Every structure is written in structure tokens, then in C-alpha cells.
Image (cartoon, helix red, strand yellow):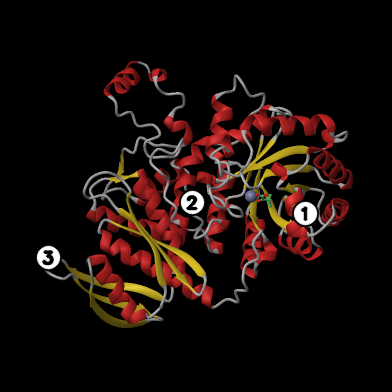
Amino acid sequence: MSNQDKLFIFDTTLRDGEQSPGASMTKDEKVRIAKALEKLQVDVIEAGFPMASPGDFDSVQAIARTIKDSTVCGLARALEKDIDRVGEAIKEANSGRIHTFIATSPIHMKHKLNMTPDQVVEHAVWAVKHARRYTDNVEFSAEDAGRSEIDFLCRICEQAIKAGATTINIPDTVGYNLPQQFGETIRTLIERIPNADQAIFSVHCHNDLGQASANSLAAVLNGARQVECTINGLGERAGNASLEEVVMAVRTRRDLFECDTRLDTTQIVNCSRLVSGITGFPVQPNKAIVGANAFAHEAGIHQDGVLKSRETYEIMRAEDVGWSRNRMVLGKHSGRNAFRSRLEEIGITLDSEEELNDAFRRFKELADKKHEIFDDDLQALVNDAGFSAENERVKLVSLRVCSETGETPTARVVLSVDGEEQEGGSIGGGPVDAAFRAMESIIGSGAELQLYSVNSITSGTDAQGEVTVRLQRNGRIVNGQGADTDIVIASAKAYINAVNKLEQEAGRAHPQKARV
Ligand code: KIV
Ligand code: ZN
């Protein structure tokens, strides 16, 4: 594919996505998501904003060391200290990029930066040149370009390219634009900037008016060749353009677009589930591509049509985006090899024999409780295995809950805390409330519960429940997950997972994160 035929996908789930309140992720979780994005074959993974905190720096560095087939990028304001920090974090990447930005709208220049337009151009040029000392892969973003004056945008982008930027990104930072207008902005920039052919034009759209994907696609129709987006449209406020919508629109409407991505779209649903599970942000059932109902035909007339010929009501094939038929894949007599090969078939490779053994042990436990194990169960099981590393200080030993009509629910729990078993009990408004209070009587975390959600992984009353618990303490927010056929036990696992993450975080210095 030439650069004109190719649409580069720049995923910012780990940076802009993580800026959604409550979506913060640990380093291990970010590395797991980065690996899934690499398997999806995104071109660029924006791994974080290293200057924001030591934790962000560590995550970007860990991802740069791990990922081989995607470019790993770090974000920097147009400041020496930010750029140096990214340069250091991506030093060991196979392919690394520095993404530097400065605001260009009159409102931001005046009220946020307190700079004249000339000073802003000077900073941008200096920043790009400084970033080029670390790598020749430098992206420049004109923050709030969507509300900037076109003449000024032309001027600053031309200077940034002259200084060495190889990608020019035009963000609609506040989601103010509409598709036709945004498309025209991109076309004008490409036509008017004399050295536009020396850079790839990129867009980064927010979804405040629900137009992020539409604006991104309008930009592609007008010459943009990189789209910045996130899995499930995660991101600040109403989110960013959703990767799955942009990628599938371009692929499905090849008749309109003169370009395509290199993505392996069969990995989309896996990525969506992973991000949703880790962040605790559920995917709405009617969400395009990745919602549970996206390919479900309820109305008789639709079902009839699809059975006769699927094109009557289907414009994409569910399996092309990674929806499996969710057939029964394994049972309690399945062996380790069958287990491993089914995981591989659905795109999951575990890193070590140890991880495989651990996941297989959990599989056997689950198969004892649940007759039929579906692909979705395997996915949850492996996600659960991934969390075990964080479940270090506190472990669930046993839980007993009594719930009876007309009686107050009670719970007794035994936890292992730093290797020592402790027992606690409580009553509660319901069995989950009683269990949480019983655990808290031992742990005493003092954390505030911000979110509790349960999702059934498959259908049937023996399905596993996947629980997310969001806890907040001293301004630090963490999400914990747990899955089990017993939803009270799944809830306890999720609570303990979140508490362990809080404990891990408490062990680290955590200066207030700088926001972009
Ligand atoms: O929305 C925005 O403008 C950004 C930039 C930092 C690219 O996220
Ligand atoms: Zn953004």
C-alpha cells in the first residue's frame, strides 16, 4: 500500500482514553491492552503522557520495551522537560514517536497560554526541532484546531513541517465541528500548505456532539491519512472517535474511500471486551460493531430476511469483527492442549507456561461448576488470570453469605492479608453489601465505592457474572474485576482486586497527575 492508499490508525486508548474520569489503568493492564492493540495491528499506540506522573512514564517505557510491531508514542507539551521525558521513555522502542502539541485557537492562546500567535509558532518550531534530536518520527498537534483560524493553522503547520514534523494532527479538541465543515478544513489545509506533501495529515476528534467518527471519516474523504481513535470510543468527556466505527466504515464502504487500514478486524471484539473489563466502562448493547445487539436480529421480518440471504439486513459479517458463534467449545473433559489451542484460535496467547497452567486450573474449576464453556467464558477466565498478579496482599479464602426472604442478609468472610488469615462478618442491605462490609471490617481500606456493576458473560442461569467495582481513596480511582458463576463471589473477587490495586498505588509516590 502506498501512503495515499493507506489509512494509519493511531490508537490513544491508553492516553486520551485513560483521561476519562474513572478509567485509570495499572501498568500491567496497559501492557495487556497494548499487546492486544499490537495484535489488532494498529499502526501507532499512544501509550501515555510520561510527564504526567512516574507511573505514566513507567507504563510508556514498559510498552516501548514490549511492543515490536506497532510504533509506540508518548505525548509531550511543547516544553523541554516533557519532550525529554518522552525521549527517555521510548528510547528502547523498536519504533518510537514523540507527539508534541500546543494550542492554536484564539481562546486557548489568550486564556490558557497567555501567548501571542508569534510566540506559539516559535514554541511549536522549537519543540519539533527538539523532539527530532531523539527520533525522526515526530508528530505535531495544533490543540483546539477545530476552533482555530485557518490562516494561522496553515502558518503553524507549514512551520512545524519545515522544522521536521512528519505527522500533522488536527484535533477537534472540544468536539465542536460538524462533518462537512471539518472535511473542508482538512482539504483547505492540504491544498494551501506548500509543504503538505512532506507530512501525513491526521485528525483527532472528540465526541461532544456525537460527531467524532463522522468528522474523522469526513477528514479521510478529504485527504487525512491518519485517524486518532480509541477502543469503544473511550476518552475525555464524551470520548474520542471510536476505532471500530472508523475502521469498519472505511472497510465496509470501500466504494467511497480511496484507502484502507492494515488492521486485523477479527481482533476488534477481543480488544473491546478487554478495555471494557479493565476500565469498568460497559459497552452499551446498541453500540455499533461491538455492542451485544450489533448483529442480533430480533424482528421476525429481519430474521427471515437474514436466513434467506444475509445481505438483506447485514452490511458486515459478525465474524469479521471477532464475534464468535459463542458455541460450546470445551467441557470438563477437555485437556490442556485443547484448551491452549482454543485460546490461540480466539487470539489469546499466554506469555508463559506458568500463566497457561494457572489459566487451565481455573478452567477446570469453572468446568466443574458450568457444563458448557464458551469463548466468552475463556476470555473472562484469562482476563481474571491477568488480574491475579495484582491480588497479592489480600486474598479471598472463603465466603459464606445467608440471604432469606424477610431476613437481614449476613456474611462471614475469611481473607488472607499478607499471608495471615483473618475472619470478619457483617450484616448488609443485600448479600453483596453484607459481603463488602464483612471484608471492609478486616481490611479497613476506608475507600469509597463509586461504581458496582454486574454483567452476565454468556446466557443461561449458570452463566458467569463479571463484576466491576470502582473504589476511590485520596483522589486515586481504581477498578477491580472478578468473574464467577456465583455473583456474590465474583463481587468479592472484584472488591479484593480493587483493594489490592489501591494498596499497590499507595506504595508508590503519586504526585497529582498533570492533565493535558
Ligand atoms: O484533544 C486534544 O486536542 C488532544 C491533543 C493533546 C492531541 O488530546
Ligand atoms: Zn484529545
Vertical placement of 390 versus 228: above or below? below
- Residue 61 relative to residue 100: left or right: left
Vertical placement of 480 versus 370: above or below? below
Viewer-closest of 395 and 405? 405
Could you tell me which secondary element the residue under label 3 belongs to? loop
Distance from disc 2 to disc 3, alpha carbons, whole Å, reads 37 Å
Tell me where residue 506 appears, x and y as whole percent. Answer: 52, 77
Q: Quadrant of the C terminus?
A: bottom right
Tell me where residue 458 appears, x and y as whole percent. Answer: 30, 45
Q: Quadrant of the N terminus?
A: top right
Q: Which residue is mark 3?
A: 404
Vertical placement of 325 versus 274: above or below? above
For the residue with label 1, is its CB less than 8 Å from the closest atom of ligand 1? no
Distance from disc 2 to disc 1, alpha carbons, whole Å, reads 35 Å
Q: Which residue is mark 1?
A: 109
Dot 2, how many residues are within 10 Å of its Cα: few (below 14), some (14-19), or many (20+)?
A: many
Which of the labelled discs sits on residue 275, or is there none? 2
Viewer-closest of 250 and 473? 473
The residue depicted at 16 percent of the width and 66 percent of the height is 403
Could you tell me which secondary element the residue under label 1 belongs to? helix
